[in-house]
Amino acid sequence: SLYQAFRTFDGPSKVDKDRDTRIRHFLTELAALTPHNWKFIAPAITPSGEVLVTTLEKSLPTSEFTISTKCIFPFDEKNAYENIMKPLDRILFKVQEHLHRVDGGDVSGNSDKEAVKKKWWDERGHLDDELQTLLKQVESNYFSEIFEDSEDSSAHLGEFHRGNLISRFEQVASDDRSESKSRHEDRLEELKKLTIPKIKEELRNIGVDEPRFRRLRKMELIELLMKEESNTSSRGTL
């Protein structure tokens, strides 16, 4: 039963391996209870504005779950929050305001009750149309083809395109490494131009004890300074 499947998570998981074992057991139990034509879908918006869609479905003939995650990257400068959540919040806020304006006294105290009712329903119909338009745009731009298998990770989805999340992260990491290497080389050239007393002064300024560098040569001083600057920067980001 589902009750037994979810009991897998009863009790603490002291180590990651224990947690992973529990998750695998849960998925095995859930797969046995899930019809073949069911698909679990979990969309999420990342902090940087992409949409992640994770799907969980049974694969034949093993009847085990297949898990996949696809990422949709905005094609324009706006992110998913600007294109989905912000207009949705605006419409829902207007709906709540509209519902709060429902007052029996407004109807009973008005000689033209039918006109008041008609106006209210016309406004509600307009809000429903706004919501329907937004949902159609989101479906077309984000999800119309997201569940179709495609070998081409750069296939376009309307105004948005689908991509391989791992390759995107690898590209970002590669860019970061290149930028870091460039900063390192620039700093090295800058320090080579300084005199030994000036390098020692900078070491003192960042809290390095003088006995550590008193007998060092210039390049050794530079290496120590750059190492200490890196350590200081790392601690500052924690």
Image (spheres, helix red, strand yellow):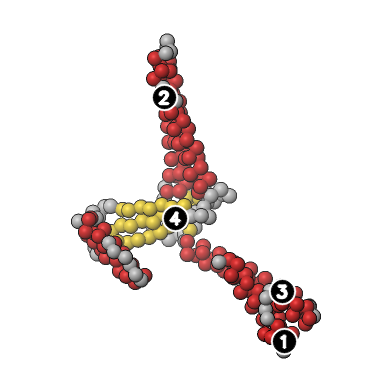
Where is residue 112 shown, x and y percent of the image? Answer: 42, 12
- Residue that label 1 marks: 214
Residue 167 can be seen, yes or no:
yes
Residue 6 quadrant: bottom left
Residue 197 quadrant: bottom right
Nearest to viewer (mark 2 / mark 3): 3
- Residue that label 2 marks: 102
Q: CA distance from mark 4 to mark 3?
A: 46 Å
- The amino acid beneath tag 2 is Val
Q: CA distance from mark 4 to mark 1?
A: 54 Å
Outermost top residue? 111
- Residue that label 3 marks: 205
Where is residue 182 shown, x and y percent of the image? Answer: 67, 71
- Residue that label 4 marks: 52
Which type of secondary structure does the marked residue at label 3 adopt? helix
Residue 129 can be seen, yes or no:
no
Nearest to viewer (mark 2 / mark 4): 2
Nearest to viewer (mark 4 / mark 3): 3
Q: Are marks 4 and 1 in contact (CB under 8 Å)?
A: no
